[in-house]
Amino acid sequence: MVVTNNQGLFFFSSKQGPSEEEFHFREGRNFCLERGRRKRREEEGQSWEERLQENWENCLELNLSYQNLGDPYQRENFFRILRRLIRVEILQLIDNSLTDLSSVRLPRCKMLNLHRNQLVCLRQLPKLPAVEHLCLSENAISSLRGLGALGSSPLRSLNLTRNPVTFSRDYRAQWCFLLFAKPGGLGRHSQASRRLAAPPGEGTGTQQDVYHFMTL
């Protein structure tokens, strides 16, 4: 590096680099870190390959909660498994950062727990023709649009606790319209009661927004 002093004279100054010993230490540490990452990726790949060999088609009850789905490869294999669950009746998918399950069909699922994911609307739910109990608490659902897709399901309970939609002022009015007034709503074949302590007409958000249905 070229530097000038007060007299305008030039001289060269160089910054001392790491010693040879320190250089080799850093190089070795980087090699170990990279080898660890590569080994972890190989183990995860092997784990998913082993999972895909399971007989998912005959699974009746399954817990796939708290999965690490940050990598596209992991997410792709996770969805492959979901699409093979043609007989599952009870499915737990808690805290998986799921954003869209609309490409998945769970024809026999009676109980689905999607607590603490990242769904923003009901249209992102999987196809659930047989669902009876559906938990969507602590997602990011901001509207009830898409609720009609559950109109043909024998739904008995729906948990929407701590979703943004529960804070809206006309939340209950929207719910009642979609449930009873709208053609094809859930009220065609069920009678609903709601367990909620707040005064009517106000969204609560912090209360337990759980709907219970009784098939007629």
Image (tube, rainbow, N blue to C red):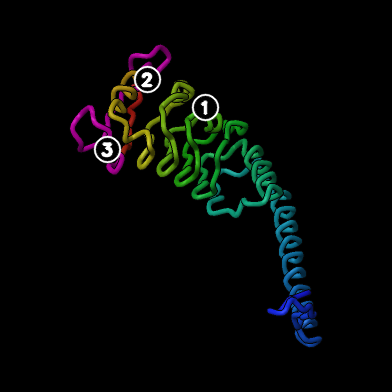
Sequence order check: which comes first, mark 1 or mark 2?
A: 1
Q: Amino acid at mark 1?
A: Pro
Q: Label 3, secondary structure: give it.
A: loop
Q: Main secondary structure of the magenta part?
A: loop
**Residue at left offset 49%, top offset 48%:** 94
The span from disc 2 to disc 3 (Cα, nearest Å) is 19 Å
Is residue 113 shown above or below 66? above
Q: Dot 1: few (<14), some (14–19), or many (≥20) neighbours within 10 Å?
A: some
- Asked where in the image residue 178 lies, by quadrant, the reply is top left
Nearest the eye: 168 or 4: 4
**Residue at left offset 36%, top offset 42%:** 162
Q: Amino acid at mark 3?
A: Thr
Percent x, y for residue 4?
73, 76
User: Which mark, residue 129?
Assistant: 1
Q: Quadrant of the N terminus?
A: bottom right
Q: Label 2, secondary structure: give it.
A: helix
Q: Which residue is mark 3?
A: 204
User: Which mark, residue 178?
Assistant: 2
Q: Which residues are magenta?
A: 180-208
CB within 8 Å, label 1 to label 3:
no
Percent x, y for residue 152?
47, 21
Is residue 4 shown above or below 110? below
Is residue 200 shown above or below 60? above
